[in-house]
Image (spheres, rainbow, N blue to C red):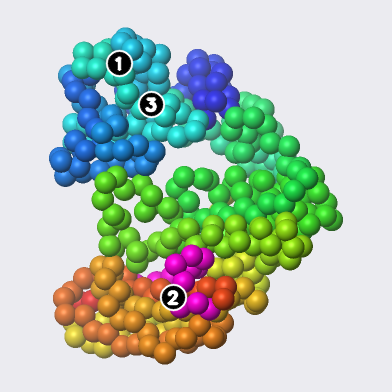
Amino acid sequence: MTWADPGYFEDFWTVRGYVGADDQNLAQQVYEVTTTVGSVLTAEDLLARGGNISAVYYFDERHPVAITLNDGDVSRMAGGAITLLSGKAVGRELAISAVLGDALGAVTGPYGYPELFDGVAPGDEILVSNRKFLAQCYWPQYHLEGELEYRPNHTWAVDGQQIYPQRKHHSFMNMGPDYLYHFDGKMILVQSTPDINHWEPAATEYHAMARRSFGDQLDDHFRLWWNEGVPRTAMLEVGTPPKPHFSTWEVEFVGAVDQAVFDLIEWIENGKEPPPTTGYEYSPDGKVTLAPSAAERKGIQPVVRASANGAIRAEVKVSEPVNFEAEAEVPGGTGKIIGAEWDFEGDGTWPFKEEGIDGTSDSIRLSATHSFDTPGTYFPAVRVTAHRNGDIEATKGRLPNLGRVRVVVS
């Protein structure tokens, strides 16, 4: 968050009252080294080494996305930042996103350097430091975020007096130009929980501030649709498709975006209101909890629940049958169920398809039995997909969700 409060990162290490200045134990965790670039690696190079790197989906496989170093303890560099001290990219600062063997990958995006290591050459001098990362870990206790009614002040206080120095509130949404939270048109915000690319408080804050701006007219302009189980990992694989087992704990978000676009067009052009905002609660510790039932949750994603032997966790012996049950429901008026499938071993193959689903029902109850041949811990999953028009052959607007359980086999 250097962009939000650049002075904080200096004050943290130099001003009394900040942990960085007061705690010598933390000072001992600082790692800084000046060294030189050994080699510059493309995404293709990384794949040839048997690895991949996240956050480079803006580029083709020939773009430089990582480097190796001529000196320095690479194992201590996770969480650090690279500053180019010489060469064509002098002055560029990149946060280290991954340590892959002896290679360092970096973060890119609309608020970083999209060039990554473009222009960097072997022999260029760099500084690697984790000072900003360590300071970032303590950000919440110096930046109270109590301006919004749903986000009360953190409890860094004794007898009403704050323990730590407090700095100006910096919004999760204040990235680049300030948001006004008021617009003349209509908006559907599709947000995932969890979402590794977009922190959940960003959506909750935008929702709260839009509510403050529009008041009773909020529903004339705005919807927030939450999807669960959508970390967007599938977008972060470079040159290879997502690992199959990912599909047993995450689902695609593209169908929800498709439907949001369709509904937004109808809302603007024909005055047809889209489904209501998802029911959710946001707690001060940053957790978003979606309403438990489809009727309460609303939005457009189906709600799916699963059990193994009547609970979310089962302990069984090898070859002992496990009874699985699942139920799913689509929020009222938002679609029909077009498919359901099971993956008991958690390997992403989804070998068990439920037959007879024809896209005419908005709820479903399922049961299945499976036994395990090898001891271990398994995470069986059921995946249920809905569609607005109940089109079982649809390629757009597919809305999946998962129910998962744990089975311990001994």
Q: Amino acid at mark 1?
A: Ile
Q: Nearer the viewer, mark 2 or mark 3?
A: 2
Q: Amino acid at mark 2?
A: Glu
Drawn side of residue 28 relative to residue 123, left or right: right
Q: Give the residue pinned by disc 3.
A: 115
Q: Nearer the viewer, mark 2 or mark 1?
A: 2
Q: Is residue 85 visible?
A: yes
Q: Give the residue pinned by disc 1.
A: 126
Q: Residue at x 48, y 59 (%)?
A: 253
Q: Amino acid at mark 3?
A: Glu
Image position of 317 with respect to 379: above or below: below
Mark 1 vs 3, N-terminal side? 3
Between residues 236 and 166, which one lies in front from this camera angle? 236
For numbered disc 1, what is the local secondary structure? Answer: strand
Q: Residue at x 37, y 42 (%)?
A: 57
The alpha-carbon separation of the residues under discs 2 and 1 comes to 53 Å
Between residues 293 and 188, which one lies in front from this camera angle? 188
- Pointer 1: residues within 10 angstroms few (<14), some, or many (20+)? many
The alpha-carbon separation of the residues under discs 2 and 3 comes to 40 Å
Q: Which residues are magenta?
A: 390-408
Q: Give the residue pinned by disc 2.
A: 393
Q: Is residue 277 visible?
A: no
Mark 2 vs 1, N-terminal side? 1
Labelled pair 1, 3 in contact (Cβ < 8 Å):
no
Where is residue 159? Give x, y as percent: 70, 38
Where is residue 260? Give x, y as percent: 60, 59
- When asked about the image quadrant of residue 66, the answer is top left
